[in-house]
Image: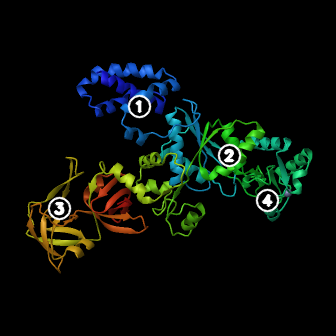
Amino acid sequence: MNDFTDLIRAYALRNALDFGKVDAGRIVPKLFAHGLEKSALEEIMPVIMTIAREVNGLSVGAREHAFAPLASLIPEHVEKEKTLPLLPDARQGLVVTRLPPEPSKHLHVGHGLSFLLNAEYARSYGGKVILRLEDCNPEKCTQAYADSIIEDITEYLQIHLASISYVSDDMPRLLEYAEQLIQKSVAYLCFCSQEQMRDLRHAGKECACRTASVAKTLEHWKEFVKGTYGAGNAVLRHKGAMQSENHVMRDSVLWREVDAVHFRHKKQYRVWPMYDFYNAIEDSIAGVSHVLRSNEFHQRGELQQALRVALGLRQPTVVEYGRFSVAEKTTKGREIRELVESGAYIGWDDPRLVTLKALWRRGITKDVLIALMHQVGLKKAEVVFEFPMIAAVSRKLIDATTERFTFVPDPIEITVDGAPLDLTEIAFPLHPDRPETRTERITPGIVSLSAKDWDTYKGKEIRLVHGYNLQLHATTKEGTYTSLDNKALPKVTWVSTFALPARVFMDDGTWVEGKVFEDVASLKIGTVVQFERFGFCKLDKVLKKGTGQVYEFWFTHA
Ligand SMILES: [Zn+2]
């Protein structure tokens, strides 16, 4: 028993450090892995509970101190797989992270992983995660995109959000902060043309507008807010440092006028803040404790920090990680929009895309993305995803639980001479590791093979998967029954005359037509099955066609 006491204490401390408090349910399976007998569980439970109470009463520092000498008792790989690195300056219960998408496009796998990372950190510290829709570009943002994003986050990724807000609803406050910057002489109205300003910034020279007095700038600002100057004729700039190495510090634009109707506020506002302005302020005033962001935003950090210093706002802790990008697949909103609008792609869920909508519809579960998120964690280097990586993780997760099924593409009917007449149904295992079966009706002596299998095996002896052996004729669509013995023969998938029409939407955007065994009718929409010798597919919908039905699947992965 003594051995287990130390082990229990080690796991309880690790558990408390990772998740904020001890969950006895997580410790028990670990003890079994260390040889604890099930019969001893009753005896050991009170020990676990006592240690859990004791550990829960310790401060984070005391837990770390107590864990150090026991750490070696816990196998290293178990912890590495599941645990993200600790966040700096994080306090239990006080971690607030945020998801800041712009509702101007649909989310892709990179957003999904970054959002899951934020959600996981909030959860592991007993904190919260908020969704902030950064809708300050009235020309691009729409309610439809906002709704799609909320759906992806809450229904697909199943992230529990503490709140959902729109930056545009904060406009009165943001306008006040802009005025404060002017009063503090940290921002000015600039009337230079874009070309002039580009040259000045390049040369590291200040423009004449910068020297206007605070009083004059405030007058300009009031007119600017009303839209007096017209879009493109004036902007509010940060008074930065024109010789700064970091070009973001060379008087970046903070506000601009936009001549467009906003989807929430219609024509109420003529001027809109730029990313660095609203993002810096919102992170602070919304109580965000930790900003987790990819290091492509690194240059912007200095400006954001300067704005918060000028406004006397709290600085959140910034943690940077490498950019998540996707190889070979388009993730740019504009490119995708063109493909969708031209009809080349069926929509934002087209299987050639790696949008969350596409992954969801194909049957890639959120658990796959969570596993990927743990793999990449907070790596500093850029992480380039390819769909095969997603597929590999998914296959590992679902292979053991996904039911097997049969789909025959382009079926060709074969008459089998001498097939056992009493063979009118066959039991197919639901999974090679499970005892349950599904029973399919068959017509003795008639089977359908795929056109490809026919071409490959005509003239040869084959074995029908879970069926019998037959010798295929070389030319006519016929065969001769040979035996039931499970001999070493090419195994060919097949369906009976009772099979129903089905089609699979492949990941290259083409359809494969075929047939499935009739027990397909028992599958619920959304179920992923593995079609033997074909791949994993998700039942997307059942289409009515004449008097019958067509089962439509989406190809998940091989
Ligand atoms: Zn100027």
State yes or no: Cβ of the residue under disc 3 lies below 8 Å from any atom of ligand 1: no
Q: Earlier in the sequence, mark 3 or mark 4?
A: 4
Residue at mark 4: 201
- Where residue 242 appears, as percent x and y from the top left, is 80, 54
Tell me the distance, in whole angstroms, between the alpha carbons under discs 2 and 4: 23 Å
Q: Amino acid at mark 2?
A: Asn
> Horizontally, is 407 left or right of 540 in the view?
left
| Of the pair 541 and 209, the residue shown nearer to us | 209
Q: Earlier in the sequence, mark 2 or mark 4?
A: 4
User: Are dots 3 and 2 in contact, CB under 8 Å?
Assistant: no
| Of the pair 110 and 316, the residue shown nearer to us | 316
- Where residue 151 appears, as percent x and y from the top left, is 52, 48
Residue at mark 1: 71
Q: Amino acid at mark 4?
A: Arg
Under circle 3, the secondary element is loop
Residue at the location (69% across, 54% down)? 137
Tell me the distance, in whole angstroms, between the alpha carbons under discs 1 and 3: 60 Å
- Where residue 549 appears, as percent x and y from the top left, is 33, 61
Q: Earlier in the sequence, mark 4 or mark 1?
A: 1
User: Are dots 3 and 4 in contact, CB under 8 Å?
Assistant: no
Q: Nearer the viewer, mark 1 or mark 3?
A: 1
Q: Amino acid at mark 3?
A: Ile
Disc 4 crowd rating (10 Å Cα; few below 14, some 14-19, many 20+) is: many
Q: Amino acid at mark 1?
A: Ala
User: Are dots 2 and 4 in contact, CB under 8 Å?
Assistant: no
Q: Earlier in the sequence, mark 1 or mark 3?
A: 1
Q: Is 496 located above or below residue 155 in the figure?
A: below
Tell me the distance, in whole angstroms, between the alpha carbons under discs 3 and 4: 78 Å
Quadrant containing the C terminus in the rendered view: bottom left
Residue at the location (79% across, 49% down)? 240
> Horizontally, is 131 left or right of 284 in the view?
left
Residue at mark 3: 442
